[in-house]
């Protein structure tokens, strides 16, 4: 009986955040996807005034009820002198699921505004772009998508980051699927500042300078970051100061 009560309490704790998000105004359950905002938000520098190479990594709340649990992540690249950006991401409704398409990199994700996770510019970005494109081309599961526990859109981005030396990005704690490791049970943290141990995206632990301590239970993350001090809660994500934008340029 005690074991059952303990398990029930643990599940209730994990679901408290998503339930809170659904009960409040943090998740839009009413707007149809075709009417949801997809406008650029101004986070990306216009190519017309930015001749240098640019690499940016974004995250935004997932669409509809999924937003109570997770964020969606993607990578945007612009080569030096290019007139447009290219977005690299996994889409659940497309096959192959891996999609690299031209267009505004900082569009709202079906009503949810994005935020920057990383921003690389100039020579550093120019070196990263061909490595990113090569990693996208060799992603081992281009036709496979499973929302939980993975592989999904966040699994893809986390895998790309680990494959590209110099691309260090601390992914949001609620980027569900980022802890689904495709190669073994031990890997570098996406930020490159620590390590993580994970089993099938369902159970794991991550310890790194940038991410802090994260404990993954059933794909949902509890954790604490000491610099700056913040809590990480399932569904809610980061509670405290925003994670610093990584890269060689601080857009703030």
Image: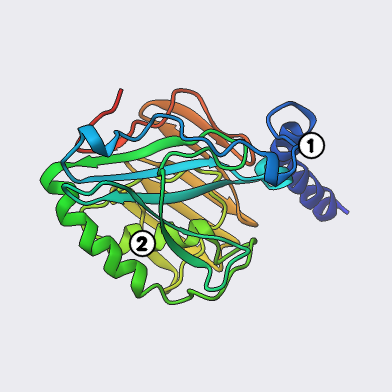
Under tag 2, what secondary structure? helix
Q: Is residue 178 visible?
A: no
Q: CA distance from mark 2 to mark 1?
A: 33 Å
Give the percent coordinates (x, y) of residue 209: 32, 41
Question: Residue 20 is drawn in which quadrant?
Answer: top right
Q: Callout 2 environment at 10 Å: few (<14), some (14 to 19), or many (20+)? A: many
In this rendering, the answer to whether 36 lies above or below 162 is above
Under tag 1, what secondary structure? loop
Q: Viewer-nearest of labels 2 and 1?
A: 1
Sequence-first disc among 2 and 1: 1
- In the figure, is residue 139 to the left or right of 248? right
Q: Is residue 91 visible?
A: yes
Give the percent coordinates (x, y) of residue 43: 38, 31
Quadrant the C terminus occupies: top left
Give the percent coordinates (x, y) of residue 244: 34, 31
Which residue is depicted at the point 63% across and 67% down?
146
- In the figure, is residue 146 to the left or right of 190? right
- Label 2 belongs to which residue? 160
Instruction: Please tell me which residue lies in front, 86 or 69.
Output: 86
Specify the farthest residue to the left. Answer: 123
Instruction: Please tell me which residue lies in front, 4 or 153.
Output: 153
- In the figure, is residue 83 to the left or right of 105? left
Which residue is depicted at the point 83% across and 51% down?
2
In this rendering, the answer to whether 104 lies above or below 137 is above
In this rendering, the answer to whether 90 lies above or below 126 is below
Question: Residue 1 is drawn in which quadrant?
Answer: bottom right
Which residue is depicted at the point 19% across and 46% down?
53
Give the percent coordinates (x, y) of residue 154: 50, 56
- Label 1 belongs to which residue? 30
Contact check, label 2 and label 1, Cβ < 8 Å: no
Instruction: Please tell me which residue lies in front, 97 or 146.
Output: 97
């Amino acid at each position: 009986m005690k074991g059952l009560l303990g398990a029930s309490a643990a599940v209730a704790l994990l679901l408290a955040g998503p339930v809170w998000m659904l009960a409040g105004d943090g998740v839009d359950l009413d707007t149809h996807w075709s009417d949801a905002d997809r406008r650029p938000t101004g986070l990306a520098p216009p190519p017309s005034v930015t001749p240098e190479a640019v690499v940016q990594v974004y995250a935004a709340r997932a669409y509809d009820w999924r937003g109570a649990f997770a964020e969606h992540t993607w990578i945007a690249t612009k080569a030096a002198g290019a007139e447009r950006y290219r977005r690299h991401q996994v889409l659940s409704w497309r096959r192959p699921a891996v999609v690299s398409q031209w267009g505004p990199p900082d569009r709202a994700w079906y009503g949810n505004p994005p935020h920057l996770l990383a921003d690389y510019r100039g020579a550093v970005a120019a070196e990263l772009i061909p490595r990113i494109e090569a990693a996208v081309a060799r992603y081992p599961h281009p036709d496979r998508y499973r929302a939980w526990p993975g592989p999904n859109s966040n699994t893809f981005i986390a895998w790309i980051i680990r494959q590209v030396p110099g691309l260090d990005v601390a992914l949001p704690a609620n980027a569900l699927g980022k802890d689904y490791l495709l190669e073994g049970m031990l890997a570098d943290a996406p930020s490159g500042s620590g390590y993580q141990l994970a089993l099938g995206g369902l159970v794991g632990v991550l310890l790194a300078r940038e991410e802090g301590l994260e404990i993954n239970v059933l794909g949902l993350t509890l954790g604490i970051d000491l610099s700056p001090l913040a809590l990480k809660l399932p569904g809610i994500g980061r509670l405290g100061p925003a994670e610093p934008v990584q890269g060689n340029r601080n857009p703030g």
